Image (tube, coloured by chain):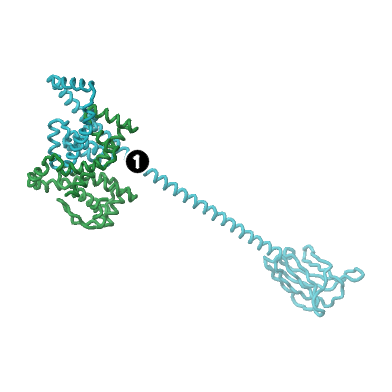
Chain colours: A green, B cyan
Amino acid sequence: MDPQSENRRSGQPKSRSVVKTKWTPTQQAFEKLLAAFSLDYEVAAAQYELTRSKLIRFFERRALYGPEGLADETLDRVMRRIDEGEVVTNMMAYVYKVASFVVLETYKEQEKLHKAEDATALVTAALPLTEGDENPRLVCFDRCLDGLPVETRTLILDYYREDGHEKIQLRRQIAEKLGIGLNALRIRARKIRVKLEQCVNECLGQAA
Amino acid sequence: MAVTNEQAVERRYLLGTLADDERRLFEEMYFQDDNAFAEIEFAEDDLVDAFVRKQLAADDHERFERIVENSPRLLSRVEFARMLRQRSVSQAQVTANTSSEAGWSRSRLKSYFVFQPVFQFALAGMAVLFLTASLILGLNWWRLRWESRQLVAERSTLETQKQELAQQLASQKTRTDQLDAEMQNARKTNEQLNQELQETKDQLSNTQSTFPVAPAFTLMPSGIRGGDSPELVLSSRAREIQLRLALENDDYVSYQVTIKSPGGVPWSRSNLRAAGRRSARVVSVRVPSSKLPQGEYNVTVSGRSPTGDNQFVASYPFRVKK
């Protein structure tokens, strides 16, 4: 479970980027929330993390600032309702409903912020990727890529090498060589890609 | 590369071009379906790669660029995809240089068609038609899939409820059976106890009838006492009575007792012996109560001489009252 979840478990209030609630999550409330996901603690914890990821993507795709904070705000609201005794029969539908309310509330508040921050945000975001060894991202990328086992490194580079028809042919050949199906190959390649991306982000974090 | 209906809808969602209702439906679906959410993650990879490789249509490219600019996470992903692309290509450089003649011919042929304006227009038209059809089909497909998943979820809920009810029913039945068994046992025990009680009652009744406590009456010879004959009050429960007939002298070996009533059949017992202290010898006889209805009676005692003759000893009149 992520540190934010740990904060929540310890019952400490967490700051929100835009929307704030007066209610403070408690350990007991958090446990009730987990129980609403599943009675099996491990399953519930995994489900909690997945739900948080879904919420982050959801808010991000609605072009709202601070998607992580909004995801936590949504989960806090759901936690509060459950703690207050609300019986939730379809947990994910309920989470989505609460998230939709959070979107509506946040749109108005962020409208002003959008206007104020547009210029600076775009300047920061649109910075082109600098070429050369000095680019810390590239350094991190190469370091992480070299850290992979040879077979894994070859697989990920081959998988993303070609375009169009050649790409399909190549992926078919790789799958055949590995003795797995195309879908299994797709899943395997994505796992490597996610791992590599995480490694790069962690490396950049350390460098900063 | 052929794009499936599903992928087309996912891409429209990621580009933010789905209508509000469609987007709401789509989001609601992936919130409840983890596999669908995973598919969107794949679709995002593909979109990022296509963006980096400049394979998106111009407006889609522009749209996604705006999205990326506002998302540090996507910006990071785009940069990552760009580097992955660079490294993949450089890794494959040698392979690319040794590509076959057939590959070259194919490339030339491709270039020829691509640069023909008519072909380009036709291709663009076909692409638009294909994308429109894909989008419509894709949305329908998503809607059907969503409804289907809803139905499956409802069915699953019903199944769960059904199983729970079956378990409760089975549990209830077990409890009922247990109670039935306990009731049967209790009934059997009750019957057994009733039977034992009845047997005890019967035994008591038999005991009473077999060994009744016979009331005893002592009668004196008529000449001695004088006056009215004594009255014996018999209980209806008494099966028999004991008459103790007092003797003035005990001169005989054995005695015979005969009870007579006016108009009644005489009742007698012989070979009776006198008992008791020397000064108060009595002859005792047990008489069934049935032989003594209410009325007047006279008891005659006669003694048997050593020669075998019966000689009158004494008489004892009495009355019976019930």
Does residue A64 appear left or right of residue B255 in this picture?
left
Element under disc 1 = helix
Relative to the observer, which residue lies in front, A175 or A75? Answer: A175
Where does residue A40 sit, x and y in percent of width and height? Answer: 34, 49
Which residue is label 1 attached to? B156
Picture layout, residue A173 above or below residue A58: above
Quadrant of the image occupied by residue A134? top left
Relative to the observer, which residue lies in front, B161 or B12? Answer: B12
Q: Residue at x 13, y 37 (%)?
A: B65
Where does residue B185 sit, x and y in percent of width and height? Answer: 55, 54
Where does residue B10 sit, x and y in percent of width and height? Answer: 22, 35
Quadrant of the image occupied by residue A96? top left
Does residue B186 appear left or right of residue B118 in this picture?
right
Picture layout, residue A177 above or below residue A36: above
Res B128 visible: yes
On the rendered image, what quadrant is the C terminus of chain B found in?
Answer: bottom right
